[in-house]
Image (spheres, rainbow, N blue to C red):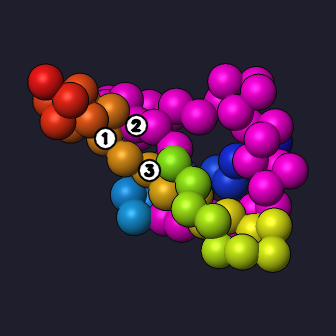
Amino acid sequence: MIRDQAHWLYENYVQRMTTKEWKQVLLNEDDTIIFKGRLWRLKARSLGYGVVEVRKHHLISEEKDSI
């Protein structure tokens, strides 16, 4: 599994992975998780040189922002 298990343990956990691994997460549709009973989306930010930083964001708050 590419996603680190710490995403389910710590709310502010940040994982670094290669862009190749991140693309695989997206292609497998593994970019959403349930943490503490809430739906979260994983989002990546490029750090350059083929590395991304992956964090959790509330999926519900994103829907409210888009309305």
The residue beneath circle 3 is 56
Element at label 1: strand
Q: Which residues are magenta?
A: 13-42
Q: Residue at x 15, y 30 (%)?
A: 64
On whether residue 39 falls in the magenta region, the answer is yes
Residue 2 x, y percent position in the rendering: 79, 47
Q: From mark 3 to mark 2, how far is it between C-alphas?
A: 6 Å
Image quadrant holding the C terminus, namely top left
Which quadrant of the view contains residue 35?
top left
The residue beneath circle 1 is 58
Confirm or deny contact between disc 2 and disc 1 (CB under 8 A): yes
Q: Amino acid at mark 1?
A: His
Q: Amino acid at mark 2?
A: Trp
Locate residue 43 relative to residue 63 in the image: left or right.
right
On whether residue 40 falls in the magenta region, the answer is yes
Confirm or deny contact between disc 3 and disc 2 (CB under 8 A): yes
Q: Amino acid at mark 3?
A: Lys
Confirm or deny contact between disc 1 and disc 3 (CB under 8 A): yes
Q: Earlier in the sequence, mark 3 or mark 2?
A: 2
Which quadrant of the view contains residue 6?
bottom right
Task: Between residue 47 and residue 11, name the one nearer to us.
Answer: 47
Against 8, residue 63 (above or below) is above
Which quadrant of the view contains residue 44?
bottom right
Residue 39 x, y percent position in the rendering: 37, 29
The residue beneath circle 2 is 40
Mark 2 packing: few (<14 Cα in 10 Å), some, or many (20+)? many
Locate residue 28 relative to residue 63 in the image: left or right.
right
Against 63, residue 42 (above or below) is below
Image quadrant holding the N terminus, namely top right
Task: Between residue 51 and residue 17, name the one nearer to us.
Answer: 51
Q: Residue at x 26, y 35 (%)?
A: 62
